[in-house]
DNA sequence: ATTATAGTTGAATAATTGTTCAACTATAGA
DNA sequence: TCTATAGTTGAACAATTATTCAACTATAAT
């Protein structure tokens, strides 16, 4: 049996009603993308740790690096990503840049996931 | 000024008290890793869409593929990842495999993030 | 038995991404 | 002014990963 290249949708629907029902409820593409993007930003353990740390204290780059056992450069790169996503904010005091969480929502999200982890082993 | 290769921690702490205070509150490494892993799984728009779809209806692979405009293969690969993370479960009915969400927690997490997105533009 | 379809899977490919390195800016102090 | 330090940044590298392709299994129907 020779098969042609698989198309995105080579078959009829199994259940057309269900598919179009869900399709209607589906959020717009951009919303889905932003949703995924937000989760993705939280989905790296360096950033996860940074966010947790900042949920406890306002910290400078150096102290975050010390805390995580990472280089300032690595931390700075990650902080930029968090800054771009508006998850952290900063203030300058002389040479030192202090970072803190910008968004309370993230703490909720974080704790919700933490509960999930801690309950489900 | 010649600089040697940057060490993980080349300097003294800026604020030793804060650092050790946060260090004490820090969750264990494995917890942080699982946290990041969980977020990472949600951090891909194909999987995000699958999870959203399954939060509405139990669906077979074919219908998910139709819904997302993806190949069955791509969907199946992603479903395996979700299965491994125990986020979805399935039941077989003849040739057809029906997937559904395994974990209510994920819906909470999802909706929490959705609120965040929709509020913060 | 044969044929068709739902779904899975391994390998390959292309794209993304986290960290390191090196160089840079800016601020503080001597 | 000169030196040291906090932090940022671009390029390069290595690792991870999403999708595609092709081949496969299993079930159903003729």
Image (tube, coloured by chain):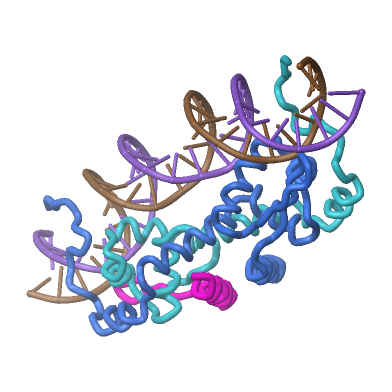
Chain colours: A blue, B cyan, C purple, D brown
* Of A89 and B58, the residue lying toward us: A89
Residue for point 88% across, 45% down: B15
Placement of the N terminus of chain B among the 4 image quadrants: top right
Whole-percent x and y of residue B92? 37, 73
Residue in the image at 84% along x and 51% along y: B23
| Total numbered circles | 0
Which of B116/A49 is in front?
B116
Point 83% across, 32% down: residue: B11
Image location of residue B96, percent across then percent down: 31, 72
Residue A3 x/y as whole percent: 14, 52
Q: Which residues are magenta?
A: B93-121
Judge left or right: residue A31 versus residue A51.
left
| Residue A56 lies in quadrant | bottom right
Q: Residue at x 38, y 66 (%)?
A: A30
Q: Does A96 appear above or below D28?
A: above
Q: Is residue A26 above or below residue B44?
A: below
Magenta stretch encompasses residue B40: no
Judge from the rendering whether residue B18 lies leftward or rightward of residue A76; answer left or right: right
Q: Is residue B107 magenta?
A: yes
Residue C17: x and y in percent read 51, 45
Q: Is residue A60 visible?
A: yes
- Residue A121 shows up from this direction: no
Query: In the shown orientation, is residue A15 left or right of residue A26?
Result: left
Asked whether B57 or A97 is in front, the reply is: A97
């Amino acid at each position: 049996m020779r098969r042609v290249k698989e198309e995105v949708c080579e078959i009829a629907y199994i259940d057309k009603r269900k598919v179009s029902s869900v399709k209607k409820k589906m959020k717009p593409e951009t919303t889905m993308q932003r949703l995924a993007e937000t989760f993705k930003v939280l989905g790296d353990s360096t950033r996860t740790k940074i966010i947790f740390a900042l949920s406890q204290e306002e910290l400078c780059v150096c102290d975050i690096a010390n805390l995580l056992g990472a280089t300032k450069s690595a931390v700075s790169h990650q902080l930029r990503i968090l800054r771009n996503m508006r998850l952290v904010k900063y203030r300058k005091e002389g040479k030192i840049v202090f970072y803190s969480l910008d968004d309370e929502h993230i703490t909720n999200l974080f704790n919700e996931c933490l509960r999930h982890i801690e309950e489900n082993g």
